[in-house]
Image: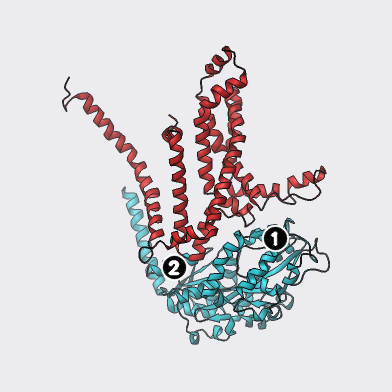
Chain colours: A red, B cyan
Amino acid sequence: MKRSVSDPSEQHRRRENGLMLALVSPALLVILLLIVLPVGWLVWQSVYQDGFTLEHYRRVFTEAIYWRSFALTFEISLAVTVIALLLGYPVAYLANSVPKGWSILILSLVVLPFWTSVLVRAYAWLALLQRSGVINQLLRYLDVISEPLALVHNTFGTVVATVHILLPFMVLPLYATMQKIPGDLMQAGASLGASPALTFVRVFLPLSLPGVLAGCTMVFVLCLGFYITPELLGGGRTVMVSMLVSRNVELYNQFGAASAVAVVLLLGVLLIFAVVSRFVALDRILGQK
Amino acid sequence: MTTRTFGLGCAVAGAIALGGTAAAAAEQITFVSQGGAYQQAQTVAILDPSAKKLGITINQDSIPDAWPAIKTQVGSGKPIWDVVDTPTGYCLRGGEQGLIEKLDFSRIPNAAAMPEAYRSPYSISYEFYSSVLAYSQKTFPKDAPNSWADFWNVKKFPGRRALRNHPIATLEAALMADGVAPDKLYPLDVDRAFKKLEEIKPHITVWWTSGAQSAQLLNDGEVDIEMAWNGRVSALAKEGAKVAFTYNQGILQSTSLCILKGAPNLDTAVKFLNEAVDPVHQANLPLHIDYGPGNPKAFETGVIKPERAAQLPSEPANAAKQALMSYAWWSSPAGEAAEKRWASFLQK
């Protein structure tokens, strides 16, 4: 059957496409104005300063401190991601398996810290972890230790506080994925004679993996750009990449020097996405279809 | 647009036009400092009295770090600000880069009468603070540390230590710990300073980045001995914390006033500069905040009581115990190189 242009269904489809385009255009405009243009400007500044120059990149790739900062940032992000997964998975699992009322309570507790600023939470951790802090005092009172432990002003304190801040980004995608796993699959496993542990390992865990990957990607990428937490809890020695960015503005009085660091970090993140997407369809992770 | 909002728009436009002509008749400047309690203290002690005496309007703005804004404003060719109160190093660097006006001291007699070390072709010292050796009196009830050599002496003065995460003043302290006299520091022997810093590095618990952080560390007993700014330590002591500091071998630092190149109200700005460092206005500043006047003549006015003067970093007897920071050295190529070397020192 031939379809003419005046086919009503074709017309309808076109009208709908036009409408869709009209509806997404404000969002596209915002993305263009607030993301594409600034990032483009950032890249431009990193290579142009009274003429084309790769000086800023030469510095990033040849000076040891940059390499150390990038390595430390990736190490911290990896540690934070693993810890957040180990802590977050059981929480999401519990929220998924208890009755609705309880799961709402659990999820509210997970999201609650969102209402406190990152800065306030960093100071709260300082009050907990420092030498005269709650934890050290308690341990000394219980005679577990005789000298206060160095829990903060180092990488340890930074990791602890960062995990706390990023945990919801792990729990929420995990929970969303687990919600979509049909409960009867578990019953089917059990009816075929599998133990609860085996059903979990063979059925539930593989089906929750997209959530694991989504959570890990979110936490890892967000952690790469952390600034305030390492600045306040790192004791000056934990220099993450974002701190290099701000320091470079100060040190070189040129945005280009800082832009180059930011661009390298951005490329690093894109590279991670590219690698991850080889294993899992990214649109499925991010879109949660 | 409805008629009402249109009417409102006209009214606003009219008001702006009127305000513009009215302001053009009376002289005015825009003055920028760092905000907070510090800018409030200046407003009471210096800005309001100066405005009244000169019959000008002083519009105020504040920014924690003025340098990027100075670059952008002057770079655009049409700066909005006239006078900026900023760390002296920025005035000098700005002067070299053509961002700051060269001053004609014949028109600024109050500044011309100040010691030469307190001014530069581009800047006039406005207020003084000091990077001092501070300590907990709980840890050191008697036999308190009194020099940077004591800070480096971890056997005689055991305890946790903090330094600022910045080379300025820290390199000076290291050299004094190594035996260099406070008045013989410049040009800094950078290699020697970093070598001495390597020695103390394993004993530093925290490299602090903000003044508030340094105060918190000392107050909470996180560290027992540290470098801090005098105003932060005295504020803690006032609140009852068992902390103290010594001006001995302190590093006397300043912020300065300078004028943006091509400032819209250059003439009035120069008049204001002279008034701002007037000894009496300057003497009023330490009555409102723990900073010392930039003009040492303030101590001769009788406005500052002797017991108050003794607490201030720029009081002549206190100043004599300290090293006067050379911003000229820090904005020289050697100084900039030392600043860049800091990051690799810390991350090694």
Could you give the CA–CA distance between mark 1 and mark 2, rounded to whole angstroms? 39 Å
Looking at this view, is B67 or A199 the one in front?
A199
Q: Position of residue B128 (x, y in %)?
A: 62, 74
Looking at this view, is B232 or A278 the one in front?
A278
**Which kind of residue does numbered mark 2 sit on?**
Lys
User: Which residue lies at the image location 39% right of the left edge and 53% below the top edge?
Assistant: A38
Q: Mark 1, chain letter?
A: B
Image-quadrant location for residue A108: top right
Q: Is residue B238 left or right of residue A65?
A: right
Identify the mark at residue B71; answer none if there is no mark: 2
Q: Which of the image's four quarters has the C terminus of chain B?
A: bottom right
Total numbered badges shown on the rendered structure: 2
**Which kind of residue does numbered mark 1 sit on?**
Pro
Looking at this view, is A260 or A23 the one in front?
A260
Q: Position of residue B249 (x, y in %)?
A: 70, 75
Q: Is residue A238 placed above or below B243 in the rendered structure?
A: above
Residue B62 in view (yes/no): no
Image-quadrant location for residue A64: bottom right
Numbered disc in front, either 1 or 2: 1
Residue at numbered disc 1:
B202
Q: Mark 2, chain letter?
A: B
Same subunit, labels 1 and 2: the answer reads yes
Please tell me which of labels 1 and 2 falls first in the chain. Answer: 2
